[in-house]
Image (spheres, helix red, strand yellow):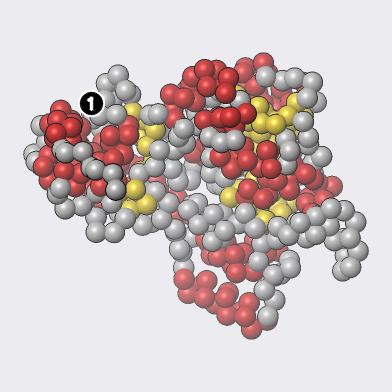
């Protein structure tokens, strides 16, 4: 039994461990003086958008980081994926994991493409290449892999399959900036990869994304399509939209890149602290990262073994939420169980066993520069108290009077 009384838990009426919420993706801010200097420069020059100085600089830095000749900045990664699909002429069907953030699937459906959901490897949490090959039909035009948690897909196997069947290969690399596969940066593989710079990402530009590619023709097409189809000052040559990143986002992105090594160091330390403090808890394990590769360690993911853990995943999330620890059930319940896919493809539920299992067993814990060692100790103590007193906790929760509706 833990030394702290179970009655002290906030879910049973105790004071929350934190006065204000601790989020999974509290924004990393970096050097604010550098950010303000860039903002002042933008305002003094009065060039706020339309491929300005800072967007071009940000793209150059990203291309260098990814080891590709072209980076095309976008207003966000979801729109970036949509523009990439349109610019690549992809229609028909695209193979994609269901175990991902729903935007990965939505970008396909939004473009009139049928997402073909395939199960993942239970260890890597990424697309299983053998199942990808089995899912190919005459309508398949591309594979869209996701480097979940920044851990690389089976890049080589997927590349071989794409080449064998004449398919496009794209990667949703929203989690993967600064991560590697065989010591090469994630961002340089397939026909193109897409980074996210949402406010919750390890590198953020408030909102933003970028498409990385070695294909000069594709890059040129992407640049036109993000700007209404313009080629030159007043010459519209193709269908386009407004997907541009503005200068303030690019300035934030540059400041974030300058602080990126410090952000990674912070995440690495946090991972070590969580791993040590949660060690030995029954049915609970912190996911590991391959020490032979580089990682940004952005996601602190805990896996619950339902056969050994005395609390369910959702019970533990409820305990943490009451303490103002806004843990997340990433990525529950799986895209195939969300609309519109649940209605469109009801037969899929029994065909994705590992996706279903992972969606019911993973917790993302707060990480990044908004979390320190004292916070991690407090979060870990709450989890330890709840798990070591699970029977008492469950009994007290069941004994509470039901809340009347209305």
Residue 194: name its quadrant: top right
Q: In the visual, does 259 lie left or right of 285?
A: right
User: Image point 90% across, 56% down: which residue?
Assistant: 237
User: Image point 46% across, 68% down: which residue?
Assistant: 31
Residue to which mark 1 is pinned = 310
One can see residue 50 in this view: yes
Query: Residue 269 at x, y = what percent?
Result: 35, 47
- Vertical comparison of 181 with 22: above or below: above
User: Image point 14% across, 30% down: which residue?
Assistant: 395
Q: Nearer the viewer, residue 280 or 336?
A: 336
Residue 387: name its quadrant: top left
One can see residue 291 in this view: no
- Vertical comparison of 257 with 402: above or below: below
Q: Quadrant of the N terminus?
A: top left
Q: Secondary structure at mark 1?
A: loop
Q: Nearer the viewer, residue 267 or 204?
A: 204
Query: Residue 339 at x, y = what percent?
Result: 56, 36
Q: In the visual, does 236 lie left or right of 187?
A: right
């Amino acid at each position: 039994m833990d030394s702290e009384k179970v009655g002290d838990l906030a879910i049973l009426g105790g004071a929350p461990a934190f006065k204000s919420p601790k989020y999974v993706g509290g924004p990393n801010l970096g050097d604010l003086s550098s950010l303000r200097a860039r903002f002042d420069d933008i305002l003094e020059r009065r060039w706020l958008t339309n491929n300005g100085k800072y967007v071009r600089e940000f793209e150059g830095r990203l291309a260098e980081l990814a080891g590709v000749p072209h980076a095309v900045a976008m207003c966000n990664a979801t729109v970036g994926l949509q523009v990439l699909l349109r610019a690549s002429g992809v229609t028909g069907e695209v193979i994609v994991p269901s175990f991902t953030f729903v935007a990965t699937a939505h970008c396909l459906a939004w473009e009139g493409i049928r997402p073909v959901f395939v199960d993942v490897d239970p260890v890597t949490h990424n697309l299983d290449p053998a199942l990808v090959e089995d899912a190919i039909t005459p309508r398949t035009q591309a594979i869209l892999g996701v480097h979940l948690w920044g851990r690389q897909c089976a890049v080589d196997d997927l590349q071989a399959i794409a080449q064998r069947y004449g398919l496009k290969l794209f990667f949703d690399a929203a989690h993967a900036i600064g991560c590697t596969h065989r010591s090469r940066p994630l961002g340089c593989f397939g026909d193109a990869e897409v980074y996210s710079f949402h406010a919750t990402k390890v590198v953020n530009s408030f909102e933003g994304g970028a498409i990385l590619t070695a294909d000069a023709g594709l890059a040129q097409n992407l640049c036109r399509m993000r700007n209404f189809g313009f080629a030159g000052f007043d010459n519209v040559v193709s269908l386009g939209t407004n997907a541009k990143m503005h200068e303030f986002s690019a300035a934030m992105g540059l400041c974030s890149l300058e602080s990126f090594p410090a952000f990674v160091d912070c995440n690495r330390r946090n991972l070590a602290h969580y791993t040590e403090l949660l060690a030995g808890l029954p049915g609970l394990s912190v996911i590991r990262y391959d020490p032979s590769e580089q990682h940004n360690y952005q996601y602190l993911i805990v896996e619950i073994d339902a056969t050994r853990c005395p609390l369910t995943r959702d019970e533990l999330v409820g305990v943490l939420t009451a303490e103002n620890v806004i843990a997340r059930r990433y990525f529950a319940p799986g895209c195939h169980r969300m609309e519109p896919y649940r209605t469109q493809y009801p037969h899929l539920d029994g065909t994705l066993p590992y996706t279903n299992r992972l969606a019911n067993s993973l917790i993302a814990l707060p990480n990044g520069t908004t979390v320190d060692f004292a916070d991690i100790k407090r979060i870990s103590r709450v989890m330890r108290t709840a798990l070591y007193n699970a029977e008492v906790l469950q009994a007290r929760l069941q004994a509470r009077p039901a809340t009347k509706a209305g």
